[in-house]
Every structure is written in C-alpha cells, then in structure tokens.
Amino acid sequence: MRFLETFFNPAVIGQYLPDIIAAMWVTIYLAVATVLTGVLLGAGLACIRAANLKSVNFCIIVFADVMRALPPLVLILILYFGMPSVGLSLSAEVVIWLVLSSVLTAFAEEIFWGGLTAVPAGQWEAGRATGHSKFQTLIYIALPQAVRMGIPPLVNRILATTKLTALGSVIGVKEILSVASSAQSFSGSATPLTMAAIAYMIIFIPAVIASHWVERRFSYKM
Amino acid sequence: MNMFLATFFDINIMMQALPLLLKGAVTTLKLCAVVIICGLFGGLMLALRALSPRGWLRWGSVIYIDLFRAIPPLVLLIFVYSGLPFAGLELAPFSAVVIAFFMNNSAYFAEVFRAGINAVPKGQTEAARATGLSPTQTMIHVVLPPAIRNVLPDLLSNTVEVVKLTSLASVVSLSELLYSANMARSVTYNASPLVLAALLYLAVLWPLVRIISRYQRGLAVK
C-alpha cells in the first residue's frame, strides 16, 4: 500500500499530468527533428564519400569517428557552457538538437557507407553500361540497396539516439525527465518519476516493437 | 581565433585540471569494469532465457529486454537514485549507477547474444544432441563459441556505448571523469577542462571505434 502511495499517488498524478503531457510533445518534437536531420545528413555524407575525394573523405571519417567515440553529454556541456564565451549563446533546445543530430549523422553515415561498399561492383558497372552517369548510378541503383541493408541497424541507432533527448534535463530543456524531476522535488513524491518512465514507454515501446518487425522484414540474407 | 583558443584550449587550465580529471578517469574505469562484466554476464543469461522453450521464462525475458530498451538510461538512473529513497532504499551514487546501467546494458547485451545464438544453424544443435550431449553441454560447447565469435563486433560496439554511458553518472554527482571536468569548468569559468575530458575519452574510444569500422566493413565485403 505504501508502495502505491509512493510511486502511484493519484493526487500527484492528477496535478502533474498536464505538465508531463506537454513535456512529451517537447521530447517527440526534439526526437523527430534529430531523426530528420541526422538521417538526411548521414545519407548525404555517405553519398559525398562515394565521390572518393581524398581530403573531403578524410574530414568525413574524422567527423564520424569523433562523434561516435565521444559521450554526447560531453559535447552538450562543451557547447552549452563554452559557446557563450566566444559570443555564441545557443538555447538548450538548439544544443540538444545540434549534438544529437551530429551523433546520428555520424552513425547514419557509417551505416549507409557500409551499405554502399556492400553493393557488388557489377551493379555499378551495369548502371554505367546502361548509360547512367556515376551520380545517377549512385542515386538510383546503389543508394536504394544501401538504405535497405542499413535499415535494421539504423532503426536501432535512431532509438538509442532519440532516447538521449533525456539528456536535455541536464541543461534545462523542458522535456519529460526535467519536468518530472522538478515535479518530484516540488511534490516530495516519487510519483512524477514513475510518470516519466511510463511516458517514455508510451513513446518508445511501439518503436522497439516496430524495430523487431523492421529487423525481420529487412534482414539482409547473405 | 585567440578567444576560441582561450575558451576551449587554455593549456594552463588544462594542466591544472589534469590531476583531478585523472582521478575521475580512475572512477570511470572502475565503473566501466563493473558495468561491462555484469552486463555481459546478465545479458548472456537473459538471452538464454529469452530462447528457452518454457513460455513464461521466455516472455519474462523478452518483456524485460524491450522494457529496458525503451526507457532512457538517464531516466532509470534518476529513478533508482532519487526515486527509490522514497521507498526507503537509499543508495550510494556508485551503486545506483551500477544498478541502473546494469538493467539497461543487460538488455542491450542480451539482444546481441540472442542474434548471435539465432544465427547458429539449427542442424548444429540437432547434431550435438544426436551425439548424446545434454542441452546445456550443447549450448556451452557447440552453440555459444561460434555465436559469440559472430557477434564480437557488436559486443565491442556495445562496450563502447557503455563507456560513453558512464558519463551520465556525473548527473548524480558521482565523481567520474565528466563530473570532475565539469567541476573544474565551474571553478575556472572556462570550458577547457571539458575539452580535456573529451580528449581523454577520445584517446580510449577512438581506436575502438576504428576497429569496429574495420570489422564491419570486412563483414560487409564478405
């Protein structure tokens, strides 16, 4: 009984439900913005990398490696606390969006590039032989196959990255976790944290289940 | 340019902060060791349960895996650290971090192991059983070795994720690498300690990220 009172207090739920729902929209909005930016830029970078320009590729590889190796929270703190000193104040939302979409861009680029290198050379030659330009072969023949191969790992990565929107709470973005944390300290009850966990489940469990489906549907048999 | 250097690459501040950061790095290493070993072991156990023929064991593990993949690790951490005390369970930051990340990581490692075990052809199990090995012996001697070999790159990339994840421990003021760096930043009003922390993370994780890329490229070409 005390357990229910602590973690599922109806009065507290009623009081903070509207705030949590509003915060869910912020989380969803940040997640969607991150996914769109990250996947599109990632695909773009993979295509640029296919053009095989040495110095450009070097930059892309360094960017992708650094973004995959650094903990996102480090980047968030550097941008949020460091940039104002060089005269560029970014809002907390923008910092989260910038960092998360850079991270997703890096992973998406690697995934798409892995797919592009796995497309057999014969496909490229066939495309060129039928009169497509190199660019057309890339866009119409190689990229669709690379995207198809990349979908299962990409979906997993999208899930992992969008969950990181919770890091927004560290710099005060009004997303689910930060709203729940402050509600917890105001109400002196653990219930808002339970609500936060449930809110995340409502958003992400369908995504996890969809990822299982996508994995079966698009699994690439060698 | 000078302003940029002074904000992010102040050598004097970096040298001053270095001892503090190295102390933090030791905590980060300890944390990684505990979380990775527990996560690997727990993940393997979960994967075996998730593949068990007994319905309730299987469903229990599948629900566990999906649930903890859906909840952001930071939410779990805050829940364990500031939610559980309401139920009378007060945990030190280190234990709270270990428990929260164990729940998250065992789910991720379980997914990896499950994929590996599923990829071992059924005939191998049947052959082993037909030669008189018990189900446990079959699992240990016949199925697991190739399964683990197949998913080594994924295990490695998950391990990198765990190291990155430990930076979240700074949120509950466990004095690991990022927390120490952020302390140094707030004392010096300068982002250089954070950049130094980023460099330390890079020094350890960049080589691993490179290896993973190589490995995955190799598999894709094959």
Image: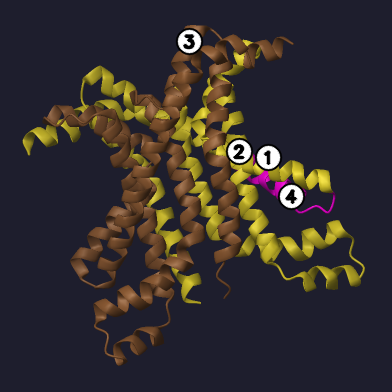
Chain colours: A brown, B yellow
Q: Are marks 2 and 1 on the same chain?
A: yes
Which residue matches tag 2? B68
Which callout, 4 or 2, points at the residue further toward the start of the chain? 4
Which residue matches tag 3? A185
Question: Toward which corner of the image does residue A94 lie, by quadrant?
Answer: top left
Q: Residues within 10 Å of mark 3 (few under 14, many from 20)?
A: few
Q: Are marks 4 and 1 on the same chain?
A: yes
Cβ atoms under marks 3 and 1 closer than 8 Å = no
Q: CA distance from mark 3 to mark 2?
A: 25 Å
Q: Chain of mark 3?
A: A
Q: Is residue A9 magenta?
A: no
Q: Secondary structure at mark 1?
A: helix
Q: CA distance from mark 2 to mark 1?
A: 6 Å
Which residue matches tag 4? B50
Q: Is residue B68 left or right of residue B173?
A: right
Q: Residue at x 38, y 31 (%)?
A: A26
